[in-house]
């Protein structure tokens, strides 16, 4: 998944070069939409980073094998 996120800008650029006008600049609307998307993404990332709340509110317990060999699912236990 991470490699897709890294390659997405390159793929978008290649698509633009392949389908776009030769030597032309992208339309102003595309640049404005891109700037707005980057600003919104940065604002969301900053908000999540500065919020600092523990979303789970507890301790993650991974799945494990029970005494009878059954897989017990993961769960969140309340913080102590």
Image: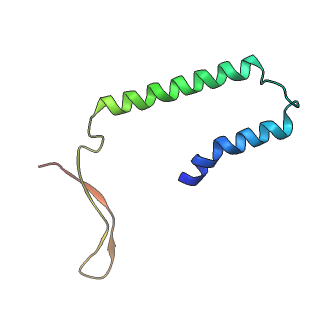
What is the count of numbered marks?
Answer: 0
Quarter of the rendering containing residue 66 = bottom left
In front: 32, or 57? 32
Asked if one can make out residue 1 in the rendered structure from this viewpoint, the answer is: no
The residue furthest front is 23
Answer with left or right where residue 8 lies relative to residue 21. left
- The residue located at (52%, 24%) in the rendering is 40
Asked if one can make out residue 23 in the rendered structure from this viewpoint, the answer is: yes
Find residue 36 and report its horizontal and vertical position in percent.
59, 21
The residue furthest right is 22
- Above or below for 8 versus 77: above
Colour style of the rendered protein structure: rainbow
- The residue located at (32%, 67%) in the rendering is 63
In front: 73, or 17? 17
Find residue 43 and report its horizontal and vertical position in percent.
45, 25
Find residue 52 and report its horizontal and vertical position in percent.
28, 34
- Above or below for 69 versus 17: below
Find residue 16 and report its horizontal and vertical position in percent.
78, 36
- The residue located at (30%, 63%) in the rendering is 62
Classify the position of the N terminus by image quarter: bottom right
The residue furthest bottom is 68
Quarter of the rendering containing residue 71 = bottom left
In front: 20, or 45? 20
- The residue located at (47%, 28%) in the rendering is 42
- Above or below for 12 versus 77: above
């Amino acid at each position: 998944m991470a490699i897709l996120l890294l390659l997405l800008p390159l793929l978008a650029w290649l698509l633009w070069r392949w389908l776009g006008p030769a030597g032309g600049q992208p339309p102003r609307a595309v640049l404005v939409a891109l700037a707005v998307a980057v600003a919104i993404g940065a604002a969301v990332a900053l908000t999540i980073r500065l919020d600092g709340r523990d979303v789970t509110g507890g301790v993650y317990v991974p799945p494990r094998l029970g005494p009878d060999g059954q897989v017990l699912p993961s769960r969140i236990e309340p913080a102590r």
